[in-house]
Every structure is written in C-alpha cells, then in structure tokens.
Amino acid sequence: VGGINVFPMSIASKIKTHPKVKDCVVRLSNGNQRLKAFIVPMEKEWQEEKIRMELGKWINSHFKIEERVSSIQFGRELPYNDMGKLTDW
C-alpha cells in the first residue's frame, strides 16, 4: 500500500481486539492502493453510523497511515460463498 508492505491478516487480528468487533477480514481494495475491511459487530443490534465513527477513530489512533482501512463494510456474518470461501464485498 503506497509502496509499503502491509499484512492484511495482522491488521484484521488487531481490529478484532476492539471490544465491539466480533470478527473481521481485511484485504486490498480493487485498485490495490488501499485496504478495505468487512467487520461483524459484537452486538446483535447495532447502529452502523455510530460504530463506523467509533471504529474509524480507533483505527486512526492505532494504525500507521498505510495500515488504515479506507473502506469498511458491516454485516451479521463474514461473506462466504457456497463453497465456504471468502467472497469479495
């Protein structure tokens, strides 16, 4: 990302340490210029804008610029296809 090696699995593991995150995956975005994340919030009922703001602030304070995700999508479970493989989001 930006000419610097980053490790999406390590970044996802660190994001999972946030108390409101149940699960997370991180990968390069389509242009391979930035990272994107898919996050499953801990709560069954959650407000997307509220958790997006909270996580955005937390990510900005805990990650280097090149490790920060530029896009976050939320869902109730990680996006797997019928064959059990992680799909794009």
Image: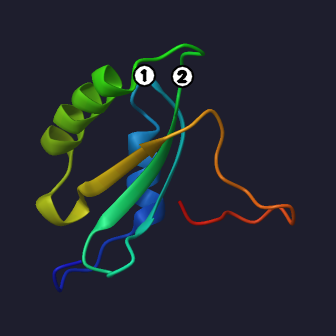
| Colour scheme shown | rainbow
Corner quadrant of residue 50: top left
Residue at x 47% of width, y 17% of height: 46
Residue at x 38%, y 55% (from the top left corner): 11
Q: Residue at x 17, y 86 (%)?
A: 3
Crowding around mark 1 (Cα neighbors within 10 Å: few <14, some 14 to 19, many 20+) is few
x, y (%) of residue 24?
Answer: 52, 45
Q: Nearer the viewer, residue 40 or 60?
A: 40
**Residue contact between numbered discs 2 and 1, judged by CB atoms under 8 Å:** yes
Q: Which residue in the protein does label 2 denote?
A: 42
The residue type indicated by label 1 comes to: Pro
Q: Quadrant of the N terminus?
A: bottom left
Amino acid at the residue labelled 2: Met
Q: Position of residue 44 (x, y in %)?
A: 60, 16
Dot 1: element: loop
Marks 2/1: CA–CA distance = 8 Å
Element at badge 2?
Answer: loop
Q: Could you tell whether 79 is left or right of 81 in the image?
A: left
Per the image, the residue denoted by label 1 is 19
Q: Please, is residue 75 above or below residue 32 in the view?
A: above
Q: Name the mark on residue 79.
A: none
> Could you tell which of marks 2 and 1 lies nearer the N-terminus?
1
Give the number of callouts: 2
